Each structure stands twice: as structure tokens, then as C-alpha cells.
Image: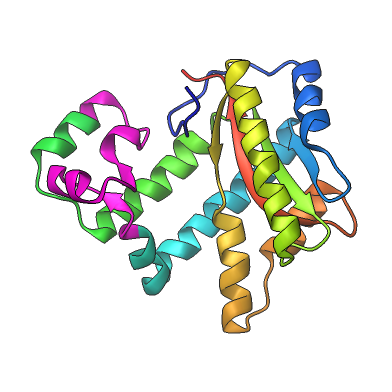
Amino acid sequence: RRHTNRGPYRDEPIAPQQLQRLIDLVSSPTVRLVLLVDDGARREFGALVVQSTERIVADPEMSMDSFRWIRTGRRDVLVHGDGVTIDTSGTGRRMTVAAKLLPDLNATRIDRIWVDMTRDVHTATASAFGMILMPDRLSMAHSIAAGRAWQRLHLAATAAGIAAQPLNQPLEMIDRHHMLGRQDEFGPSLANLARASGWEPTFVFRLGYAA
């Protein structure tokens, strides 16, 4: 039953004790989980996710790298057997049906849908946002520990009836800035929200009860 849920989540808070169980489940000497539930922190975090998504689609190379994973037509779905299809994109039933009838969408249209969904659904309906942090995000051992933590967290959330979706656009932009030698603002902004000095965010996501 575990899967990425990109659809809207209900306006229903997750019980604090349930969130604490998730924190206790994955915390270790190399992994720390921070969950953001108050309105101010969620707005600030959501704005970072939307801004980073807009940066990705404005970067031609990043836009095309993302588009390669979008399976817009039945042939692509059957040939590749991977990526994101319209059925798993979180769009409403009417748009899903229309998209299957219309010609395949191009990268520009896909990017616009992604930004709109990120702003109006993904960040607007989350009950909580989360960040997995570690002391050194470039350490392979720490990265494996963080990946294992996400698997445990997602399974536990699913067992509790909680939906989840990775929202790693800010991390993609951090890496892009480092790759191009640019000054990065997303890392410091996430670290400031996490209030965890000396720890670096490596994976971000949202939680909530699926609508």
C-alpha cells in the first residue's frame, strides 16, 4: 500500500503523539528528523519548495532532465515501465481523462502543471512538512542511513493511514548551485527552519491524510 501520494490532503492535523513516534522511529546518531507543523514554518517551507520548483523549470537542462521521467502517453508507459504517469500525478479525474485523450504534453506544459500543483496542492494542503538531516550530506554512509530512515518512516506512516510525498526540489537546487559554483540560499534557509546547527538537510517531504 505504500506509494507516493501527489494528490490533495485533508485539512486535518496529525496527532502530536503520532508525529513523535515517527521522529523516535528514525532518529539515530547519523539521522535526525524535523517535522514542521505550525502555520508560519509551513508557509515558509512551502514557499521554498515552490521557489525551487520555479528555478528548476527555468533551467533548460534541469527541465529536460525532469521531463525525461514523465510518461505522457500509453506507449511511453508500456515501453519504460517507470517514471511518473498522469494517473500518479495527483491531478483531478477530469484532467487525467482529458490528458489521456489529448496529444502528449510537451516539457513547457508539464513544467507549468508541476509548478501549479506544487503551489496549489502539494504545499497548500500538507498537514506537516518534514526534513531528514545528517551531519554530512555528502557522506555515502550517512546518505544510506538517511535513505533507510525514509523507508522506515514511509512504511510507518502508511500503516498509520498517513500519506506522504517527497518534495526534494530545494535539495536539487542546492546540488545544482554547488555544481555550477553559485552561491546557494536554499541550504541555509532549510537549516534555519530545522533549527539544527551542524546538521544538513538531505531529504524533504510532506505528510497528511489523503483526500
State whether residue 49 appears in this view: yes
40 is higher (above) or lower (below) than 155: below
Closest to the observer, 145 or 24 = 145
Q: Residue at x 57, y 82 (%)?
A: 180
106 is higher (above) or lower (below) than 45: below
Closest to the observer, 164 or 140 = 140
**Coordinates of residue 2 in the picture (x, y in percent):** 50, 27
Q: Residue at x 57, y 15 (%)?
A: 161
Magenta residues, as a range?
A: 67-95
Closest to the observer, 177 or 26 = 26
Horizontal arrangement in the rendering, residue 27 relative to residue 185 (left or right) = right
Horizontal arrangement in the rendering, residue 78 relative to residue 2 (left or right) = left
State whether residue 162 appears in this view: no
Q: Residue at x 31, y 27 (%)?
A: 92
**Coordinates of residue 157 in the picture (x, y in percent):** 63, 24
**Coordinates of residue 177 in the picture (x, y in percent):** 60, 74
User: Which color scheme does this rendered protein use?
Assistant: rainbow
Horizontal arrangement in the rendering, residue 95 relative to residue 20 (left or right) = left
Q: Residue at x 67, y 33 (%)?
A: 152
Quarter of the rendering containing residue 136: bottom right
- The answer to if 127 sits in the magenta stretch is no
**Coordinates of residue 101 in the picture (x, y in percent):** 9, 37
Closest to the observer, 75 or 140 = 140
- The answer to if 83 sits in the magenta stretch is yes
Total marks shown come to: 0
